[in-house]
Structure formats: C-alpha cells, structure tokens
Image: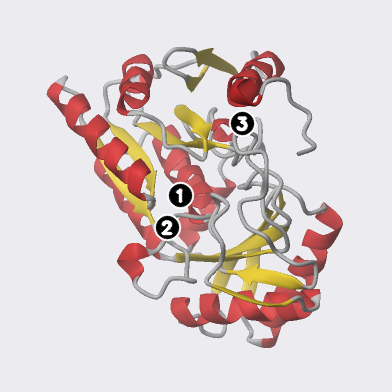
Amino acid sequence: MQKIINNPADAALESLQGFEFAFRRLLRVSYNPNFVWRRDAPVAGKVSIISGSGSGHEPLNIGYVGPGMLDAACPGAVFTSPTPDQYLAAIRAIYGGAGALFVVKNFGGGVLNTEVALELAREEGYNVASVLIHDDVSIDQSDNRRGMGAAILVEKIAGAAAEAGRPLDEVVTLAQRTSSQARSMAVALSSCTSPYVGHPTFNLPSDQMEVGVGIHGEPGRYRTALVSANQIVDILMEPIVRDLALQADERVLVLVSGLGGTPRQELFIVFRHIYDLLQQRSIIVERQLVGNYITSLDMAGCMVTLLRLDPELTSLWDAPVHTPALHW
C-alpha cells in the first residue's frame, strides 16, 4: 500500500485536523464527537441543513459546509456512517430555531443512524425532517438504490432555499423534488484501497472495468472489457436518460465526478461526449460541474449524475454559495 499517511488508524482524524487548519476562516470543527459547522452558525430563523457520510468521499460532505449550502456535516470513519451522537451534537450547535433538514444517502448504516438521530432530536424538542437520496440507476428497484451524486445537488438547492429564508416545509419539498429528478451511475477502472485494510477492495485486471460501482469501494453490478471513453459514457448515460424519461428541449444539470484517482483531463473527455449525446437528443445542458466532488478514496473511474432542471431549481442552483468545495 502506497499512501501519504502516518498511522492508518489515524488517517481520518489527521485529515480532518488538516482540513480545519486549511479552512478555519470559514468553518469550525468539533472533536469527540466529530462534526464540521459553519463559522456563523447558528443563524437565527434559518432552516439548518445537516448531512453526513463516512470519510474517504472528500470533499463530500465536510467540503460543502458554509453559507448557501450545509450548516453542518458529520464525518464518520473511512466508509463508516456517522453515529447518532455526532448528528445530535451538530444540531445542538447549529439549530437556528426554524427547523432542520437531514440529507440522508441510502446506505443501510447511514439510514439507521440518521433515524436514531432524528428520534433523539425530536425528543429534545427540535423540529427535524429528512430527505432520502437514492439515485443510483445501476440498481433496478428504486427503493434499494444507493445515494450518489444527487446528494451534492440536493444539499446545494436545499441550502440555497434555507439561506433565502424559506420555511422548513418548502425546503423539504424542494429537496425531495431535486432528489426525485436526479439519476446517477458510476464506473471504476480500479479498486480503492482503504488505509485500514491496506489492500484493494477487489481485484480488477487492467483490461477490465466495473460498471455500476458504489462509493464505498463496492464492486459494480457487472464486469466487462475496458472500452473507450465514449463507449463508457454510452454505457452510463443510456440508463440515466431512460430512467429520467428525458425529452427534447428539457434542461439538465450534468455532474461528472472523478472517484479520486482520475485526472480532470479524462473527466473533461467524458463531459465532452455527454454534451454531444444530449445535444443529439435536443436536451439542453443548462449547468455543469466537472471535477472531484464525490469520491471513493483513490478509485480510478467516474460518476455521472443528471438532474432535470426547472426555472426554480436553476435559480436556487445559481444562488451564491461559499464553501471549501463550491463557491460562486
């Protein structure tokens, strides 16, 4: 295992400490339990947006804390869901009195721990709600789909609505609409290596690829021969476009995220073909993000997410945001 770390057991904590040093003008970091919160929180009268995930997906979620997006994010150990006490400590720190929305990615441990946290928060008198992210079209049954790139889009749009002073019920409705109108799929050209484990999660020959991978190092839905960038895009885009039932003249936001081990040069090659494919269908690429936005440690590969836009969602996407990973 070749990694720039000290003790593997300390990697997530030391990374969080370095993150705090790098962005201390924007954020505050709490330890034991661990959570990141915006420096000006709590903001009185504003709906609070909270999310969480295991470490190893950076910049998700700690990189999206700040004005216009998340009020707090809870990082777990590598690929391990945050605990209920992390969420509870976070809401105590950032609650502004107007309610709070938890953004939950559809993974077993994450869903369970968030449900416990919501119950405990309600017992303490907090007004809380949640939205489930399940956008991975590599899984046929919608309820079983994993949470992927749609999490970033929901957090940005819900965060903008909250920043504008909208009440909790409106923020929840917008978050649910965004989640329901987004689909994702990912492909891996290599496994990732957890510092805790010290070897790749799965073995993948150099002439093959895993299609439909998750963000925790899971193998894909199937393995096939490695093909060209354009062919990879064709494989990812067909189920996404079909599942969204996109029609000519509709407008979309396209997210192309590397999984941690892919250079941006290759991600732009991916986006180039996505843009061409959508143009051929007369589908308008209204907004786009290309880079590393939701990763799986050092996995080579990429994720594609499409969000069907409407004027309200586009306006909220364009609203100002100031976080370590997104800022305009």
The residue to which callout 1 is attached is 154
Q: Which dot marks residue 105?
A: none
* Label total for image: 3
Q: Position of residue 190 (x, y in %)?
A: 72, 58
Q: Amino acid at mark 3?
A: Thr
Mark 3 surroundings within 10 Å by alpha-carbon count, few (fewer than 14), some (14 through 19), many (20 or more): many
Mark 2 surroundings within 10 Å by alpha-carbon count, few (fewer than 14), some (14 through 19), many (20 or more): many
Helix, strand or loop at label 1? It is: helix
Q: Position of residue 147 (x, y in %)?
A: 44, 54
Q: Amino acid at mark 2?
A: Thr
Quarter occupied by residue 205: bottom right
Tell me if residue 31 comes above or below residue 140 in the rendering: above
Q: Identify the residue at horizontal 31%, vertical 16% (top origin).
A: 92
The residue to which callout 3 is attached is 323
User: On the picture, is 132 further left or further right than 323?
Assistant: left
| Marked residue nearer the N-terminal end (1 or 2) | 1
Which quadrant holds the C terminus?
top right
